[in-house]
Amino acid sequence: MLKRCAVLLPALIFVVGCTSNEWKAWVGPINNGKNVPVAQPDQLPRASLEAATRVDSLGSQILASNKDITIRPVFRTIGVTELTIFHQGSQQLFISEGLVNKCKTDGELTAVLCAELGKMVSESQAIGVRQDDAEPPFAPQVGSDVVGAGGNGDPSMTRQAERALWQQSQPRKQSGAFISAPNPAELSRNFLNKAGYNPDELIRVGPLLRQAEANPNYEKQLSGSKNAGP
């Protein structure tokens, strides 16, 4: 028995030691070739009810205020104190409880969520979209319309006007050519504005976002990336 423990203990220390301090409390399936725990979304450390509810509520508010966003991700909170925020495809947006708690106001937290959502929408808009088929990634304001398509008068007429206004701002390209991705920062500001917050909140949360970007471990663990490091 002692001999078996002597063999297993060094291996366990190696596996756990290659992750962040809080990740040491959880060991999931092993990523082939790297001996690194790979997380599954349902196995992530649970956040407090308060933090998770706050994120879900503000995430729902963002989507409800921006009906033209073509993706509808689930907002998920990870119960760790480290600052991180990332997404998987267009279906899920992850944010740590540590980052949630660093946001002193709902405006700051909404700005952080909109920053990541802007990246998600930009990526989804860039995939296989042709100039002829392009739809605005957001609804530009037309006249007194401040709530997007359908919020003022005939929805179809409003939508046509919004599409025309957006296309005027886009460089014309040869029919069938792929368009470049919309600017994530511009998308984020628009989402935040429509959610009822000052877009300048994005400036105030800039330092938090930079700290979160410097901590990619959880994103790598969740995706099972072969490049996941210590």
Image (spheres, rainbow, N blue to C red):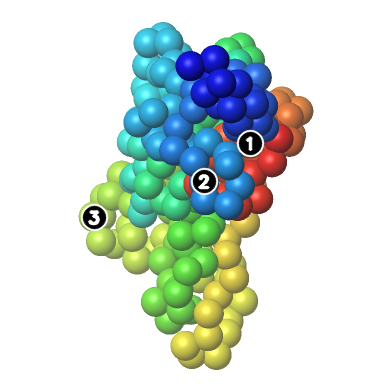
Residue that badge 2 annotates = 31
Badge 1: residue crowd in 10 Å (few <14, some 14–19, many ≥20): some
The residue mark sitting in front, 1 or 3, is: 1
| Kind of residue at disc 2 | Asn
Residue placed most toward the observer, 30 or 171: 30
When asked about the image quadrant of residue 54, the answer is top left
Rendered-image quadrant of the C terminus? top right
| Kind of residue at disc 1 | Asn
**Does 196 sit above or below residue 66?**
above
Residue placed most toward the observer, 151 or 123: 123
**Does 152 sit above or below residue 193?**
below
Q: Secondary structure at mark 3?
A: loop
The residue mark sitting in front, 3 or 2, is: 2
Residue that badge 3 annotates = 154
| Kind of residue at disc 3 | Asp
* Mark-to-mark CA distance, 1 and 3: 48 Å
* Residue 63 visible in rendering: no
First-in-chain label (1 vs 2): 2
Residue placed most toward the observer, 46 or 137: 46
Q: Secondary structure at mark 2?
A: strand
Residue placed most toward the observer, 135 or 49: 49
When asked about the image quadrant of residue 98, the answer is top right
Badge 3: residue crowd in 10 Å (few <14, some 14–19, many ≥20): few
Please state the horizontal and vertical placement of residue 168, each as a whole percent of the image.
54, 71
Badge 2: residue crowd in 10 Å (few <14, some 14–19, many ≥20): some
Q: Secondary structure at mark 1?
A: helix
* Mark-to-mark CA distance, 1 and 2: 14 Å
Q: Give the residue displayed 59% in from the left and 27% down from the top.
A: 7
First-in-chain label (1 vs 3): 3
* Residue 42 visible in rendering: yes
- The answer to whether 145 appears left or right of 157 in the picture is right
- The answer to whether 66 appears left or right of 154 in the picture is right
